[in-house]
Image (cartoon, coloured by chain):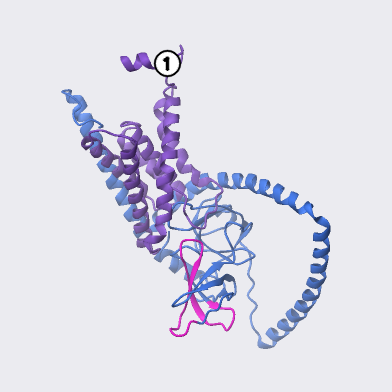
Chain colours: A purple, B blue
Amino acid sequence: MVRDALSPPRRIGQGPTPWSAYVPPATVVGASLLAALPIVSTSGWYPDFGFLVLIAWRLLRADPWPAWWAAPLGLANDLFTGYPIGFSIALWSATMLALDLIDRRTMWRDYWIEWVLAAVLITVDEWLQWRVAGVVGADLPFVKMIPPVVISIFAFPLVAWLVSRIDAWRLGR
Amino acid sequence: MATARPGWSRRAQYGLFFSFLAVIAGILVGLFLLALSLIAPQSFQSVRGAALDITGPVAAALHEVTATGEGLISGAGNYWDAASQNAELKRENKAMLQRMVEAKAIFQENQQLKATLQLREQTRDTVAVGRIVGSSFTSPRRFAILSVGGSDGVRVGMPVRSPNGLVGRIIDVGSLASRVLLVSDRANIVPARLLRGGIPVIVQGRGDGTIDVRPLEVGRNPFKRGDIIITSGTGGLYPPLVAIGRVVKLNDDGAIALPLADPSTTSFAIVEPPFEPTAVAAESSANGP
């Protein structure tokens, strides 16, 4: 192939890491575990790292993991971050499904489309968190959710870059 | 599942179809669990506790590292002008001694008055003392992770306070760590009163580290900037006479206050037994996280 010929010559013995198939889900769980960092936030403006890493992998590749793995990954996220159990399970599975449907529709993909998609997904995520919090009795005005949404949207390119680096490493490129 | 047509292979077509079904099943299971955890929050207590036992100690260990780092920096700063600090501290110490003697006299007088009134002294014992090692930092809810858990005697519903003021109450318990619903969470409503004048007020979190204070009686706004809000003990969940916050801004129907026990700088948090255990039992069965 032309592309193969143009790429720099590979060294012998360099290839995918033996556990490369499990690297993407492991990074998602790792991002959920960031909740264990000793950060005491009084405003709650940090991005939802687990979700960011999940959509970054899914936008980078169509098959980072079998689609149904989103459910157990979501369960791990719920447990570590203290969301009501079931929230991330449902949302993450629905995200996988939505992105599969979007993949059928889109003719081409570029950086801007991915960012817009991620922005929409992040907004939906934060909006649902806000709705669920309202159901439990923490009904804040939605204005309070705008700073975390904006911060998450601007954090996405960084996460996407990091994920693409990890992807290159795991495939030995 | 990525491509629309997996080709003519019947096996690939079935694979695509079943993975589609699996995702739908994932969504349904998630929605079911979410509904369950919203309606009956106590159903996942043990699972949530187990997860806390994983994250809690990690956060505690990392907290030690950062606290040591900060301590080294501020410790070095303290040496910077030790001489003038020393003089100032001596002056303060002298003033404090005088105040302490006065306070002791007042305490004795108080004891005598109470004895004449035959008031029962409420002993407030401590269940456990822990550190706030982490918090929820992504959601509209405000939780903190406390480094003590069920093995130290902590139970759901117990009030948590720091030397500065009220922190919140326990909502999830693992055996090594527990989760605290902070005063600044929207769902945390604390019956309180003004220290000045004793006007009954309601305190509710605003989700961003500040709290809303509203008077129970409609009428003139009773607040002034700098007012201290203390718990009233009504409802039996929180003990009375614990400081909650200081009013920083007035608005139409109340005021906005800052919690005195800032969870990000509070080093120690004290878990106390529930003020009136029956009220706590009723509360924890009615609503939870």
From the image, tell me which residue sits under label 1. A8
Q: Residue at x 43, y 59 (%)?
A: B289
SS label for mark 1 = loop
Classify mark 1: residues with Cα within 10 Å, few (<14), some (14-19) or many (20+). few
Instruction: Tell which residue pokes out farthest to the bottom in this image.
Output: B116
Q: Which residues are magenta?
A: B193-221
Residue A87 falls inside the magenta stretch: no
The quadrant in which the N terminus of chain A is found is top left
Q: Residue at x 30, y 46 (%)?
A: B29
Q: At which x and y percent is residue B189?
A: 46, 69
Q: At which x and y percent is residue B268?
A: 63, 58
Between A160 and A69, the one lying in front of the other is A160
Amino acid marked by disc 1: Pro
The quadrant in which the C terminus of chain A is found is top left
Q: Is residue B283 left or right of residue B126?
A: left
Between B262 and A8, the one lying in front of the other is A8
Classify B210 as above or below B104.
Answer: above
Between A115 and B28, the one lying in front of the other is A115
Classify B111 as above or below A126.
Answer: below
Between B271 and B10, the one lying in front of the other is B10
Q: Residue at x 64, y 65 (%)?
A: B163
What chain does mark 1 sit on? Answer: A
Asked whether residue A26 is in view, the answer is: no
Asked whether residue B57 is in view, the answer is: yes
Q: Is residue A40 left or right of residue A99?
A: right
Q: At which x and y percent is residue B102?
A: 78, 79
Quadrant hosting residue B153 = bottom right
